[in-house]
Amino acid sequence: MSEPSRRRPIVPEGLLGRFADAAGLVMLERRDRGRRRTAPVGEAAAEAGFYALLPGEHAARLETLLDHVEARADDAIARIVAGDFPPRGEARGALALFTGLALLLGRGQRAAVGERAALLGQLIESRLPEDEEEGPPAPDLLAPAADAVILDQEPVRVTLADLPRVARLLSARTWQLVRFPHPHLLTSDTPVVLWSRPGSANPYPAGLGAADEVRVPLDPRHALILARIAPAGEVVRDLGDRHASALNRTVAEVAQRWMFSHPDSDPMMDVELTPP
């Protein structure tokens, strides 16, 4: 394996910063519930891990594109939580790429399918419902193909060649914003969750096509839901604390090592997790 380029956080600091307090601190809690501590955003991002692009013909172009996508996605999130919903055009395209990349890199999602480097194949090969088609190309989705490596104790190589198609599939879903009265949401080192309704064969499916929802906590009071079927359409939904606890459980269940939240909240209170 060739030597990788600069390290990039698996969970971008821009996203983690939305869960920080005024002093820039985030609460970190181990997935096994054995340790809690506060840390600056950069330190929290380091705990979540890093990836890097491998040298290649298109690596430099993709590096620039990823910088641009992160910046535009951060701006789009700020607009969404301020009430500009649903996102369209460039904002939607950037968020779709941002979410797709997080799915491909998420440690917990790879572990869920039993093969650490196989999530991309699972996402693409899952059978899509007949009524779910790829959306039109969003701006900047023509990303050059390149490979990345997860910088773990045992480095894992991940291909990003099909990231544009994954982003198109995400963009084509029905987007909803869920909003809560109190700042109780958390995120984790696997910040994007594939989820299906109770009673399904697997509530945490491996494939995008099999998932009823793609869940992305944006800050302690807002989460983005990309639904396969949502008759209400692209709307903002106001939900209560009970729903926040249920959402937190789905996010925490797929965390690999760490969960992140605002230091003044306790999002895991009364939430039971399956053993890691």
Image (cartoon, helix red, strand yellow):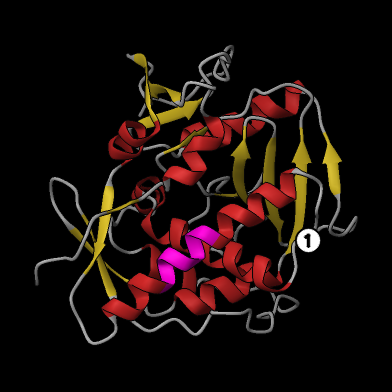
Q: Tag count in the figure?
A: 1
Give coordinates of residue 61: x percent, y percent.
Answer: 34, 80
Residue that appears at 54% across and 22% down: 22
Task: Examine the structure image and report whether residue 68 is included in the region drawn in magenta.
Answer: yes
What are the residue bounds of the magenta stretch? 65-71
**Residue 33 lies in what quarter of the image?**
top left
Q: Nearer the viewer, residue 18 or 154?
A: 18
Position of 221 relative to 263 (above/below) = below
Query: Which quadrant holds the C terminus?
Result: top left
Q: Answer yes or no: is residue 266 visible.
A: yes
| Amino acid type shown at disc 1 | Ile
Q: Nearer the viewer, residue 9 or 21?
A: 21
Give coordinates of residue 119: x percent, y percent.
Answer: 39, 62
Position of 233 relative to 48 (above/below) = below
Would you say the magenta stretch is mainly helix, strand or loop?
helix
For numbered disc 1, what is the local secondary structure?
Answer: loop
Residue that appears at 42% across and 43% down: 13
Q: Answer yes or no: is residue 160 visible.
A: no
Give coordinates of residue 40: x percent, y percent.
Answer: 37, 27
Give coordinates of residue 212: x percent, y percent.
Answer: 67, 55
**Residue 148 lies in what quarter of the image?**
bottom left
Query: Which quadrant holds the N terminus?
Result: bottom left
Q: Is residue 199 left or right of residue 208?
A: right
Q: Which residue is mark 1?
A: 229
Q: Is residue 232 left or right of residue 247?
A: right
Residue that appears at 55% across and 48% down: 202
Residue located farthest toward the right when viewing the structure as drawn? 232
Task: Examine the structure image and report whether residue 1 is included in the region drawn in magenta.
Answer: no
Residue that appears at 46% across and 29% down: 260
